[in-house]
Amino acid sequence: MSRMPRQGSRWVAQSEQFEVPTSPLSEKSGATTIEQPTIEKETRSEENLDLPWLVIVHNDPVNLMSYVTMVFQRVFGYPREKAERHMLEVHHKGRSVLWSGMRERGELYVQQLHGYLLLATLEKAG
Amino acid sequence: MEICRRKGAIELSELDPFLAELLRQIPASADPKGTAAAEQRLFSPPAHETETDLCKEWKLYVEPELRRLFQTATETVAADLEQLNGSEKTLANRVLRIPWKHADAWLSSLNQARLVIAAKYNFSDAELGDHFRSPIGSRRDLSLFQVNFYGFLQECILREVDDWKPRRAD
């Protein structure tokens, strides 16, 4: 999937200025000037103070339970017991959070789950 | 119908003409074209509609990939199903061999077909759980039987795939 710049994950460059003591030599001679350096520092924009993203699978009456379990094992590498626990949560509660973390990785998981025809979405936690 | 594992394939034997015909219909049944509900189910949004950028990118970049993926699986299944088009007597029972490496394509196509049919007929949970309904009655009954038959086959393939893993690891 090609990526386009997103506001949510943008890095914002801010400049911070520091006072640089003027050399006594240059003050006297007046021949040399030292420019105050601009130090660029990367800080995250406020809106991305990272709440994780959640990969959620929703219930679907058509998909077989055994198939859904297999998909969870394949996509997330979960052992069968954990995959079954999530499958049963989907079945009984209508949805289950399968994974949380960075958005890009979450998108990849959702894409894989859709490739297996599961109803999956990406949501921001909180 | 009998299912067994033989020489690197899952073999479906004793296929009567009715079941063979249902199998032949997998590729056509998996096609969501012309049914908005089926299209929506196969290509569901990846996030809430408020995530406009993500949904837009998804439509643009991911959906075509998914279409290709589903189509490739269906083409593989269609090629395997050509075994059923032999010149033997029309009413004779048939044998279908699904090569091991095609198992994933079959799982995908059977799932596509089940989802498309269920979306087309808007089957309720109760109907989908009714595994003993006779296929004889209406087109709807036959379609429900089709969903259940494909589900049964999916389950069999899954079991074979599961059993196969430890042996392959040896």
Image (cartoon, rainbow, N blue to C red):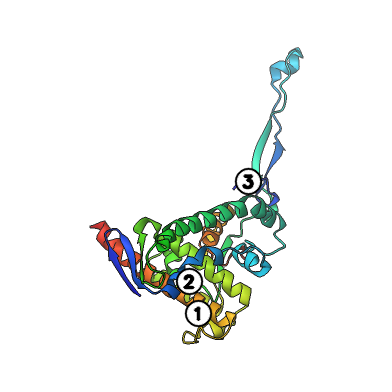
Q: Quadrant of residue A51?
A: bottom right
At 42% from the left and 75% from the top, the residue drawn is B152
At 40% from the left and 73% from the top, the residue drawn is B91
Q: Is disc 1 on the same chain as disc 3?
A: no
Q: Which mark is residue B71?
A: none
Mark 3 and mark 1 residues within 8 Å of each other at the beta carbon: no
The kind of residue tagged 3 is: Arg
Q: Regarding mark 1 in the picture, which secondary structure is present there?
A: helix
Q: Regarding mark 2 in the picture, which secondary structure is present there?
A: helix
The answer to whether one can see residue A95 in this image is yes
Q: Chain of mark 2?
A: B
Q: Residues within 10 Å of mark 3 (few under 14, many from 20)?
A: few
Q: Is residue A1 above or below residue B28?
A: above
Q: Quadrant of residue B158?
A: bottom left
A117 or A56, nearer to the observer? A117
At 72% from the left and 15% from the top, the residue drawn is A32
How far from the left and from the top, in percent, is residue B114?
Answer: 53, 71
The kind of residue tagged 2 is: Leu
- Look at mark 3 in the image and give the residue it sits on: A3
Q: Which mark is residue B145?
A: 1
- Look at mark 2 in the image and give the residue it sits on: B22
Mark 2 and mark 3 residues within 8 Å of each other at the beta carbon: no
Q: Chain of mark 3?
A: A
Q: Quadrant of the C terminus of chain B?
A: bottom left
A42 or B58, nearer to the observer? B58
Q: Disc 2 and disc 1: Cα gap in Å?
A: 10 Å
How far from the left and from the top, in percent, is residue B40?
Answer: 65, 66
User: Relative to A118, is B169 on the left or the right?
Assistant: left
The kind of residue tagged 1 is: Phe
How far from the left and from the top, in percent, is residue A37?
Answer: 69, 29
